[in-house]
Amino acid sequence: MLQFENQKIKQIVRKVLPVVTLVVMLYSCASIGRPDGGPYDETPPRFIGSNPAAGAINNERTKVSLLFDEFIKLEKATEKVVVSPPQIQQPEIKASGKRIQVNLLDSLKPNTTYTIDFSDAIVDNNEGNPLGNFAFTFSTGAQIDTMEVSGTILDASNLEPIKGILVGLHSNLNDSAFNKLPFDRVARTDSRGRFSIRGIAPGKYRIYGLMDADQNFTFNQKSEMIAFHDSLIIPRMEERIRMDTAWVDSLTYDTIVEKKYMHYLPDDVILRAFKELNYSQYLIKSERLVPQKFTFYFAGKADTLPVLKGLNFDEKDAFVIEKNQRNDTIHYWVKDSLLFKQDTLAMSLTYLYTDTLNQLVPRTDTLNLVSKQKYKKDEPEKKKKKKKKDEEEEPEPTKFLPVNVSAPSSMDVYGYISLNFEEPIASFDSTAIHLRQKVDTLWQDVPFEFGQDSLNLKKFNLLYDWEPTFEYEFSVDSTAFHGIYGLFTDKIKQGFKVRSEDEYFTLHFNVTGADSLAFVELLDAQDKVVRRRRVEKDGMVDFYFLNPGKYAARLINDTNGNGEWDTGDFAKGLQPEAVFYYPTILEYKALWDVTQPWDIHATPVDKQKPDELKKQKPDEDKKKKDRNSQNRRR
């Protein structure tokens, strides 16, 4: 019986084995992937033909078929592929095998050059190698327009390259064309912020940048990022010569040949993109997260505070008002506990509102604010357990007003002490605040400046001209600060030592080319502001007591002298305030005293911001990084 079973199993194996072998062979032949450990294919796809032909004239076909030498795919076609002149109906673009099919849904315009700019959207199927800077052109007329305009779009506030923003030309030179008409020719920026508008006819143009939110190729929303150029764009071309090398092999060249070619200008247009200020004023929302405080959030900056009238309470002297500089975020701290214990606060709020004619008019809203967090009432006394005669009841700990003391144990020479409270302060006793300096072995009281922060009513600062290497002691007597809800602060005592001047370095910039009201911001490695100083009349900018390390620098031509960067306004023809970067990262050690010359126009603007600071990295750099990480894993 066992022998019979063995023979049966052998017969099954003989029948199944050829089938399994055939399946394995077919799968091996069908697999077009790269074997593990083999070299990467770094060759991009090659365009080999199309219908209609590339550069065709008098074309009437709205369907275009492109053929390549290998299997391809499209990456983010809706973001990267741009048809010029722009299409109101989005064209259908599909990749299949070695072909790309494009179906233009808009009617073709007569005597017009059409350009389908794929940028780097076309990649090979295996490794994703992009066919960069690829565009297909045909004309519905008797000739192809060949002019090109190239340049870069940067974020006006920080010179960051902007990826994926539209850049368009208008032959209509009126400013209103940007608001009412779609572009004549259009392109989109790559990961370096670079653009190239192709297929342009000779003439004069206005050039604009537009982060087109509604995809209508016009600027009709204040929230859209825009850019405009002050000068007219006049495309032109010139004949140039380049040197081509003929090689015998990889080490030996045969001859160097001069070849003529046409170069298209301008090729260095710089556009600084910005968002206009939102001048529309309206109430975004109101909220009451806790019983004792409610907040109003407005859409834009206001010169005055809204007028509040209580409907179920008396609003006079009922609040401590905390606001920011723009008056667009306003906190109302309710002082009376009987008032904030109410479940609902009913009120009318009158404020300036932007109407449909873009005019500020008074508006009154009726609001009923209910706290999202219920007021915690005093819990009833729990039944006391019987205690032994010798067992005493522990008193409840005193609840003090919370405060966060910022007084580092190693104080910077330029530092200060700050007290940050969770609620507004009703009053404080300045005589209960002390600062002592250690001289030899004795502690001596020293005078100091103390007061409420100009921007934050819950913050208080102590200022003093510290002496390097000396020890100090900061103390506050108990009950010195009284919060608006009845709590007092506990006593505070904190010692610290001031750092030595030998731990710092000094940096001076000798600036040329800046406006008279310019200021310089010293930046850390994350592009965040560390210090800010005005440029003096002699061009000098001084930064003292800097910690050793790496720094960058940014200069703002502060046209209106308000100490901050201001955006532009297209309707007024107002460009955003110009920003410049020192083109390299600076690194210095302690005790150094360095004067750094800085001509803000010596380096082209699009080359100024150091690569280490840029958050928008080139796509090719990202792919190299991904590829290197894959190699390391292998």
Image: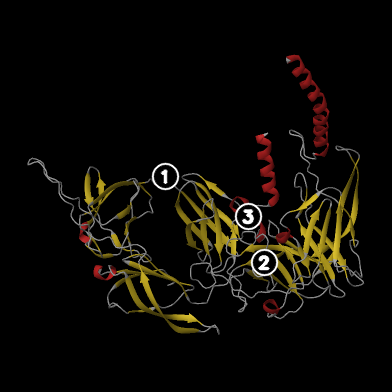
- The reply, left or right, for residue 514 in relation to residue 378 is right
Quarter holding residue 357 = bottom right
Q: Which element carries disc 3, helix, strand or loop?
A: loop
Q: Give the CA distance from mark 3 to mark 2.
A: 17 Å
> Mark on residue 445?
none
Q: Give the CA distance from mark 1 to mark 2.
A: 44 Å
When the figure is inspected, residue 382 is found, relative to residue 557, above or below; the finding is: above
Identify the mark nearer the N-term, 3 or 2: 2
When the figure is inspected, residue 53 is found, relative to residue 60, above or below; the finding is: above
Quarter holding residue 254 = top right
Residue 628 at x, y percent in the picture? 68, 40
Identify the mark nearer the N-term, 1 or 2: 2
**Which amino acid type is shown beneath numbered disc 2?**
Leu
Tally of numbered discs: 3
- The reply, left or right, for residue 487 in relation to residue 41 is left
- Whether residue 591 is visible: yes
Quarter holding residue 214 = bottom right
For discs 3 and 1, the disc positioned in front in the rendered view: 3
**Residue at (44, 84) in percent of width and height:** 362
- The reply, left or right, for residue 77 in relation to residue 378 is right
Tag 2: Cα neighbours inside 10 Å, few (<14), some, or many (≥20)?
A: many
- For disc 3, the marked residue is 616
Q: Which element carries disc 1, helix, strand or loop?
A: helix
> Mark on residue 271?
2
Q: The N terminus is located in which quarter? A: top right
> Mark on residue 502?
1
Residue 88 at x, y percent in the picture? 74, 72
Q: Which element carries disc 2, helix, strand or loop?
A: strand
